Image (cartoon, helix red, strand yellow):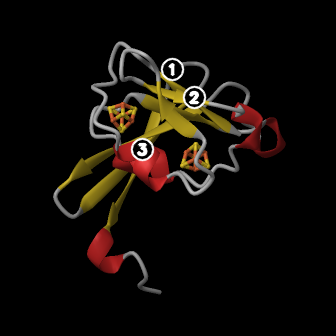
């Protein structure tokens, strides 16, 4: 698993850099986010949840059937929409209300 950053979408807000627990993200010379050592990304998804412009794609590993599918998130108030884009272009979205995130 790892992420890819679309620099055409990145606005250089720095939020992803603040939350990466491995300090893997940094600003390039244009102030856009970049990842160093992509293989060290352990897929915590913190950065994609912070990116409000959907510039970060999280690629699902082959071990869970990823085959090129990726994930991005979109925040809407207390709702966080998790969208998986399959290799054939199909999209599936799961919405989580942060007020109920720990409910069983
Ligand atoms: S959170 Fe998104 S827009 Fe902000 S620096 Fe990171 S990739 Fe760029
Ligand atoms: S998924 Fe987690 S470990 Fe990987 S770059 Fe984003 S914040 Fe860092």
* Res. 93 visible in picture: no
Q: Label 3, on which residue?
A: 16
Query: Element at badge 3?
Result: helix
Q: CA distance from mark 2 to mark 3?
A: 24 Å
Cβ atoms under marks 1 and 2 closer than 8 Å:
yes
Q: In which of the image's four quarters is ligand 1 placed?
A: top left
From the viewer's side, name the closer residue of 50 and 82.
50
Q: Earlier in the sequence, mark 2 or mark 3?
A: 3
The answer to whether the residue labelled 1 contacts the one labelled 3, judged by CB atoms less than 8 Å apart, is no
Residue that numbered label 1 is attached to: 89
Which residue is more in the foreground, 40 or 28? 28
Q: Position of residue 58 (x, y in %)?
A: 56, 37
Spatial CA span between label 1 and label 3: 26 Å
Q: Position of residue 70 (x, y in %)?
A: 57, 32
For the point 39% across and 75% down, the residue is 101
Q: Residue furthest front?
A: 29
In percent of the image, x 63 and y 52: which residue is there?
22
Residue behind mark 2:
86
Q: Is residue 51 above or below residue 80?
A: above
Residue at figure coordinates x 39%, y 23% from the top left: 32
Classed neighbour count for the residue bearing mark 2: other residues with Cα under 10 Å, few (<14), some (14–19), many (≥20): some
């Amino acid at each position: 698993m790892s992420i890819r950053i679309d620099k055409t979408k990145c606005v250089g807000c720095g939020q992803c850099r603040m939350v990466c627990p491995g300090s893997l993200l940094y600003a390039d010379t244009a102030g856009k986010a970049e990842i160093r050592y992509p293989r060290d990304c352990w897929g915590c998804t913190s950065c994609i949840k912070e990116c409000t412009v959907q510039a970060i794609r999280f690629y699902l590993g082959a071990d869970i059937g990823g085959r090129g599918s990726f994930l991005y998130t979109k925040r809407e108030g207390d709702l966080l929409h998790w969208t998986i884009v399959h290799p054939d272009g199909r999209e599936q979205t799961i919405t989580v209300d942060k007020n109920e995130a720990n409910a069983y």
